Structures are given as C-alpha cells and as structure tokens.
Image (tube, rainbow, N blue to C red):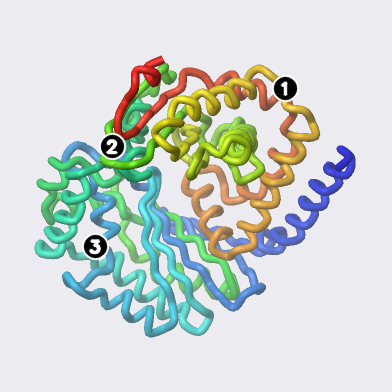
Amino acid sequence: MKLKNKTFIIFALLAFLLCATSYCYEDTAKVRLDNGAVILVKEDYKMDIIVINILFKVGLKQEEAQTSGATNLIRALIFKDDEYSSYISEKMEDLGAALSVETMPDYFSIRCFTTKEHFKECLDLLYSGLVNQNFEVKMLETEKGKVLKILKDPYGSFGSIYDFFLQNFYQNHPYRLIQLGTSTAVRNIDPVIISGFYHRYFSPNNMVVSVCGDYNKTTALKELTNRFSHMSRQELPMIKIDWEPPSKDNNLFLNLRSNVSWVMIGYSAPSYKSPDYPIMLLIKNYLSEGTSSQIWTQIRETEGLAYDLGGLFPQLEGPSHFAVYVVTDPANTWICKKKILNEINNVRSVFLDYKTLDEVKEKTLANYVLSRERVASKSINTGIAELFNMDYTYDDRLKDEILAVTPSDIKRVANIYLVNPTIILAKPSISIQDMF
C-alpha cells in the first residue's frame, strides 16, 4: 500500500475516533466534593448499560513492611459478609448487575456493571459496603492461607516469573514488591492492622468515582453526591519514594519443574505521565503487539521457535518497564534470547521508515478505537487519568500525541530506555551456552 494511502487510513481512523468519543467527552461532568472525592460522569447512550468505577490511589507505594499484601487481602475480603457468602455480590446478581474488584500497583478498582433501572440500588450497595467494611478474623485467616499457599511454591507460571523479573529489575521502588505480599507480613496481618490500613487509604480524598453510560449526568451527580459526600476525609500520610537509579545489565537464571523454557527481557520505560509514553507505546507495538509485530514475525512465524510470546508496557504512575517474553523449547532458549536482543537493538540503531511507522500507528489507533468503544474502558481510563492528576481528558489527547510521533522520536526514545536489559532465562536446566 502506498504511503499516502496509509496516511489517509490513519487520519480516517482519527476522524472515526473523534466521532466515536467526542460526544462522550462533551457530556462529561466533573465535581470535587468537600471531602475531597472526585466524581466524573459521562453520558453515553449507545448501550443500555452503566459502568461505575470506584478507584482508590492505594497500592504498592502505600504498603509498608507490616502491611505488605494488604491491598490484595482487601480485594478478596471487601463486600464479604462471612466466609462463604457476600450479600452485596448476591444482591447485585439478583439485580442483573456484575461486580468485580482488582488491585494494580498504583490503584485499587471496584467496578460495577448495571442498568438505569438499578443504578440507585447498586450505588446504595457499593456505598454501604465501603463504609461498613468489617474484616472478621475467620475470613481473614482463610484468605491468608490461600495467599501463603501460593507464595510457598512461586515459580513456574507467567505471573511468578514476571514477579521475579520485577523484584530484580527495580532496585528501590515499591514496584519491585509482590502484590500478594511477603510471607512474613501476610502471616502477621490481623484485623487491627488491615482495618487501620483500610480506613487510612480508602478515604474520599484518595478516591475517584467515574461513571459512564445510559444515565443523565445531572441526576447521576445528585445521586453520587448524596452518598459519597457523607464519607469521612482522612489525613493521608506523606509517602517518600526513593529515587530509582537507571537499570543495569542483569542476567538471571531459574531452574523450573517444567518441560518448557521462558525468556524474559526487560528495559526501563517512561511512566504513563511522561511525554515519551506514546512513543514507547508505538515501540512496544512495533516489536511485540500481535502477529504482525517484529518479534512475532522473526521468532514465531519465520523460525517457529516459540510456543507463545508477547510484550508488556504497563501504565504506571512511576517508572515503568517494557518487557518481552517467549515460551520455547529448552533447546531454543539461547537463540530466542539472541533474536529478541537483535530486534530491540535494531530499533536503537536504524531509523524506522515512515511506511512502517504509519502501519504501527494505524494498528495502535485501531486498538485505541476498539477499546474506547466499550463503556467500561471509557470509565476506567478517564478515572485513572484523574487519579494520577493528569486530568480526565488525557485519554482523549493521547491519540493526537501518537499521530505526531516521528522516526527520530522512535530512535531517540529507544536509545534512552532500551539499554541495560534485565534478562531472565527460566528452564529445566541451564547450559554453559546461556552464560554468554
């Protein structure tokens, strides 16, 4: 396809994106309550659904030695009434609603899918659960037992190898900690410790409520204000994060009780708030997003060396990372490592041509359009941007920044971040060849 045709497609995608999202942004209302809670409401009448996202800025940075793993335990226990049931979850199911809770390194997310008819009832249930949370001893001990069982044998899955990468990639930053917590901390957490942590950080001045869907924004704001304005503001501790030094070359080896090998290679990457974020997003997509990506083509399609592969570039408020992983036969471990390093080094040394860059932009914007068509994505992304003090409109501005990226930008950012890799080789046995 000719370059001008590619450019036309990209701008056509942008035009479609503007049509798909501008109505939602035009009908966005933002209110900050006296207790510090931020409420965002966006009208979107394309689907008969409403998504309520309640976000708290609490994660690894807020956990200390004795509260390591606290957010994960709260995730498992929140809204539970006893060891076997949850009145709130069961009541929401009766209303045809769905409830999910998720922990991330920088935030805690409570998400509810409902309809216009049951919006008020779901709000009542969510509010009641938040302000009447009780961490009963028996329930807490049950969840602690589940976590300790996982921590006892950590290696062999993607999640555990990724945790091992984080522990060795970050030198000072809390991102190096495991979200499950340490065995010692989890074992010692009691109702007093976890309740103190909950009431300290799950407060309105540490919260964003983002609602999007088939509901009038004025009415929704009234309903949200009537409930969340009664939550009590808390004094949030000042959290000092040690400066994270540049990464250093790091080669790590793991023996696995497995028939396959893992290769994971990671680099420093810009935070979600950095001007370099959209540039690194394009680099990540060029190298490791989908079957047309460079590493997929070279390792899976051309050589047939990988059972599975992919790339990671999480949206983190602090220093992020870009990592590529491959699952392969143990005999192919060394050659997969070499090929990944070669493709990444090429991005640093060779200018990406405009045709290839336009193709990556096209793919990135297409994914952007598809994801933002979902009401849930609109709600969570605007909420996260607001929680990170970036203003809820950032998610809409990101597409313009992606379109403005040039080959020079790609090479500049690659040479800043794609240096000093952390390399993990996890396999049934380690050969001398892997040491070089």
In the image, what residue occupies the spot 59% across and 19% down? Answer: 415
- Classify mark 2: helix, strand or loop: loop
N-terminal label among 1 and 3: 3
Question: x, y percentage for residue 416?
Answer: 57, 20
Q: Are marks 1 and 3 in contact (CB under 8 Å)?
A: no
Question: x, y percentage for residue 204?
Answer: 37, 56
Q: Quadrant of the N terminus?
A: top right
Q: CA distance from mark 2 to mark 3?
A: 32 Å
Q: Amino acid at mark 3?
A: Leu
Question: x, y percentage for residue 100?
Answer: 39, 65
Label 1 vs label 3, nearer the camera: 1
Q: CA distance from mark 1 to mark 3?
A: 51 Å
Would you say 380 lies left or right of 138 here?
right
Q: Quadrant of the C terminus?
A: top left
Q: Amino acid at mark 1?
A: Phe
Instruction: Please say whether residue 313 is visible from this viewpoint.
Output: no
N-terminal label among 2 and 3: 3
Residue picked out by circle 3: 77
Q: Amino acid at mark 2?
A: Leu
Q: CA distance from mark 2 to mark 1?
A: 39 Å
* Residue sitting at the far top: 436
- Classify mark 3: helix, strand or loop: helix
- Classify mark 1: helix, strand or loop: loop
N-terminal label among 2 and 1: 2
